[in-house]
Amino acid sequence: MNIGIDMMGGDFAPLEAVKGLKLYLSAGTPAASLYLIGDETLVNPLLEEHQVSSPNLHLIHAPEVIGYHEHPTKALKEKQRSSIAIGFHLLATGKIDAFISAGNTGAMLVGAMYSIKPIPGVARPTIATIIPKLNGGTGLLADVGLNADCKPEQLNQFALLGSLYAQHILNIQQPSVGLMNVGEEEGKGNILAQATYPLLKENSQIQFIGNIEGRDIFGDKADVMVCDGFTGNIILKMAESIYDIARQRNLASDSYFSRFHYENYGGTPVLGVAKPVIIGHGISNDKAFMNMIGLAAKMIETDLCGKMAASFSA
Amino acid sequence: MNIGIDMMGGDFAPLEAVKGLKLYLSAGTPAASLYLIGDETLVNPLLEEHQVSSPNLHLIHAPEVIGYHEHPTKALKEKQRSSIAIGFHLLATGKIDAFISAGNTGAMLVGAMYSIKPIPGVARPTIATIIPKLNGGTGLLADVGLNADCKPEQLNQFALLGSLYAQHILNIQQPSVGLMNVGEEEGKGNILAQATYPLLKENSQIQFIGNIEGRDIFGDKADVMVCDGFTGNIILKMAESIYDIARQRNLASDSYFSRFHYENYGGTPVLGVAKPVIIGHGISNDKAFMNMIGLAAKMIETDLCGKMAASFSA
């Protein structure tokens, strides 16, 4: 398998990407060929300095970078030699099997949607985040910001996409699905939640367990939690702030709170597009890059996108 | 001033209400006359047993109780001798100046809306919750569940109601107002947030500071945070679960996490109705009841509802 990594994305690029590669390689012989996409005049000296070398590494020169504040569509069009544009070109043409970047999120989403395209039948792809559960397990929340306003049919699709991710990547057999809501009973909620409930209830491809509330996010009720991207983004950022609070309270090493650190999950997969695309946090460090490479490898190994396509054509 | 207390509301009624009275009275000579509304055959023996007596206490016999699962409108109509129905009757007729109950939330809301009524000019009253800020201060979040779907004009009104509450009850001079959103820049968000931003920006009665995100809830950016009741209810219950997590991690006595305990704020005021109505948590304990009485006294003393009416007629 071939994994493409944007070496120029993230606040600490390309240093943390290089250190992340070193961590990944030192963890064992990689099954993957890694395509490092970035400015060779910046990346090569760092690879040498940090003694990162392997026959599985291939540097692809990308002399341009899309900055954080550039307009995604415009930048992708005008900067064809940027690391993100080259990454999507390699992914679209099959030269790589997955693409990872901690760079401009908008450009990553535009590339995923227009260069890779949604799986046939998927109305809107979604981005998801890992939620550490108090019982030691891991849950998945979608959407966390790609779709601020949603239709009931979209939430129903997020439930299936999330279930397949939970099953194949998080190794949860028959993941349960909960609808984020403001009460337990059917009929509760805003117009969107009320209209979504019956769709989830009738969806035979998922294990719907009903409504869940804000207090259930870290509990056992549901493995996959679905909501619109406005609600989900607020939950995601509030959950991230719990880690910041714990750190301020000198509790960052607490075995539960430490699991909220973004570096543990590394990046956010774009679910519902035809090939694996992973978007990293802007502040991605070495461990985050290592984990994103591991996630990409697992998405390729399990043929997650193929399984999603099969489910949506069923 | 005269404060009415539903002695029959809450999971541990009337015991915790009685113990809460004792706490309140033991904290000093109360300025308020307290009207205890409940079944005298149950309340009197507990008052004696716990040695709660004061010339300021007046027991009003209410032989009926509205249960947790009763239909609010139906129960209020049919159980006119219930503690909640009597409480609203006393409040509407001016016999008491504020009414507190930890009983059936729906019945409390119906009573507030139809027996007390919204302040002229207020389209929809709101319920708010206190948010403990990391800097030691206190913020206010509204709406937290009364209005699952909102219009931009309603959020604009919540901002003013919340600002007046923050100013007069939380003693925050010129409270800043933030719009819960998924990004900092104007133009971000779902349709509701996008349409609300310009209204808040143009509202000269509030100090609008722009959008805030999930990570800002516990930070310094905004004293008053406004959102629809769907989003706010999920934030509220997620914040409450942070306390449960802390307790499970043996951190309940942490000086920050302990502030998430509902008993500290006691109850949720209904903002935008003509008289003070406070709804307690179903699991209200003695400290929660004490704090609700204190909150009612402060709402009466500051004439918060009168100030709200003046602002909405301005």
Image (cartoon, coloured by chain):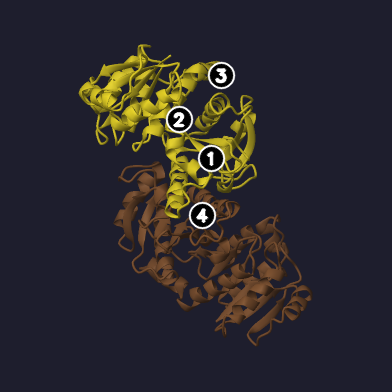
Chain colours: A brown, B yellow
Q: Nearer the viewer, mark 3 or mark 1?
A: 1
Q: CA distance from mark 1 to mark 2?
A: 19 Å
Q: Where, by quadrant of the figure, is residue A209 drawn?
A: bottom left
Task: Tell me which amino acid carries mark 1.
Answer: Pro
Quadrant where the C terminus of chain A sits is bottom left
Helix, strand or loop at label 2? It is strand
Return the chain for callout 1: B
Question: What residue is pinned by disc 4?
Answer: A144
Return the chain for callout 4: A
Q: Which mark is residue B132?
A: 1
Residue in the picture at 56% in, 67% down:
A278
Task: Tell me which amino acid carries mark 2.
Answer: Thr
Residue A33 point in image, percent of width and height? 60, 82
Q: CA distance from mark 1 to mark 4?
A: 25 Å
Number of marks in the image? Answer: 4
In the image, is B247 to the left or to the right of B214?
left
Q: CA distance from mark 2 to mark 3?
A: 16 Å
Q: Are marks 4 and 3 on the same chain?
A: no
Q: Which mark is residue B185?
A: none
Residue A298 point in image, percent of width and height? 49, 75
**Residue A131, can we see it?**
yes
Question: What residue is pinned by disc 3?
Answer: B311
Q: CA distance from mark 4 to mark 2?
A: 26 Å
